[in-house]
Image (tube, helix red, strand yellow):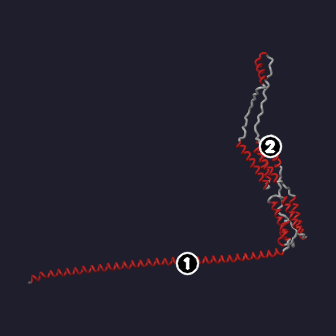
Amino acid sequence: MESAQTESEPSKTMVDSKVETTAKVKTSIWISLSILFCLAVSIAIVAAGYHFYTQQQLKELEWQQQLANVEQKLDQQSAHSAQLMARDQSLNEHSQQLQNQIDELETNVSGLAKRSPKHWMAAEADYLVRMAGRKLWLENDPLTSSELLKAADQQIAAMQDPSLLPIRKAISRDLLKVKSIHETDVSGAVFAIDGVIEQLNSLSLNQFKPKDEAPADDNVLSESINDWKENINKTWQALIKDFIHIRKRQGDVQPLMSPKQRWYLEENIKNKLLQAQLALYRNDEVNFHHSIKLAHLWLSEYFDLQDETTKNALNELEQLKKLTLSHTQIRRFDSVPLLKQLVTYGDLSGTKERSL
């Protein structure tokens, strides 16, 4: 019995140790699971917090962008409102200016309506004097300018106002100055140059004409009997002299000018003549004489001086070389300020006869 009890005690002890070991293992497993669960929960909480934080940041950025857009729209609306206000102010100012101009025009119209018909005659005289100045200074036409001044004087005389005598005196002085200008027949000179240009194609070139050498008179018979052969030869030469002529020429013979060279020559001369015409219109005497001299030089060097057409062209250019252009020394007319005074104020009160 004792031995049986002894054997059963160790087995019981082993069972108890196994139970304890199993309990410890289960406890450690539950602890590990608890730790893992806590870690998982912590990770989930952190992830949820990060996600919530990022979402909040995105929403905040969206709110800031929307706020910036609203502020930009407000700024645009403010700028547009300022532009509208400035435009409205500009329109008001422009409207005021137009109203002032309308008032001024109405005042001028009412003033013109009150003036006498002689005012229109004074305005016409002022226009004629100004046209005379343009004809004189822009077109260099003293003849037409003097006629316009005469017409202006007739307009002032037709007004039959003794107070306008200073204007008539000023117009008379202007007329004397214009008549004292030496008038150049520009149109005649231009037509003369056109005539020379038209004759260029018909001019004959200056060709080389060599002179024939006179043959030596060797046909004199000798009195010596020993020269009988030469005498026979000379007699024979004398017989055939009237039938056959043999001449010898020495020296280089220059070839005729080619058609292309002639065309270049004619174009150069024509160009100089056209420049002379342009100088006439510009009243440029220096360039006019320079162009005419060059054209005359080329004509005399390259064309036949014995030809009548060439002679006529050269004579025409010689006459043009003697042409002197008129130079206007008048800068302004004395009658212009007086006529302006008359047209503006209707009379010459407070003005004195003066010249510019």
Let me know if residue 208 appears in the view. yes
Q: Residue furthest left?
A: 1
Does residue 157 appear to the left or right of 265 in the view shown? right
- Report the mark closest to the observer, 2 or 1: 2
Q: Residue 218 location, x and y as percent?
A: 79, 23
Q: In this picture, is 29 found above or below 176?
A: below
Quarter holding residue 329:
bottom right
How crowded pointer 1 is (Cα within 10 Å; few <14, some 14-19, many 20+) is rated as few
Residue ID at (25%, 80%): 26
Q: Which mark is residue 336?
A: none
Residue ID at (73%, 77%): 99
Nearer-the-camera pick, 22 or 211: 211
Q: Measure the alpha-carbon separation of dots 2 and 1.
A: 93 Å
Q: Residue furthest top?
A: 225
Does residue 91 appear to the left or right of 113 in the view shown? left
Which residue does the numbered mark 1 point to in the structure image? 71
Q: Residue 66 location, x and y as percent?
A: 51, 77
Residue ID at (85%, 62%): 148
**The N terminus - image quarter:** bottom left
Q: In this picture, is 69 found above or below 255?
A: below
Nearer-the-camera pick, 156 or 226: 156
Mark 2 and mark 1 lie on one chain; the one further toward the N terminus is 1
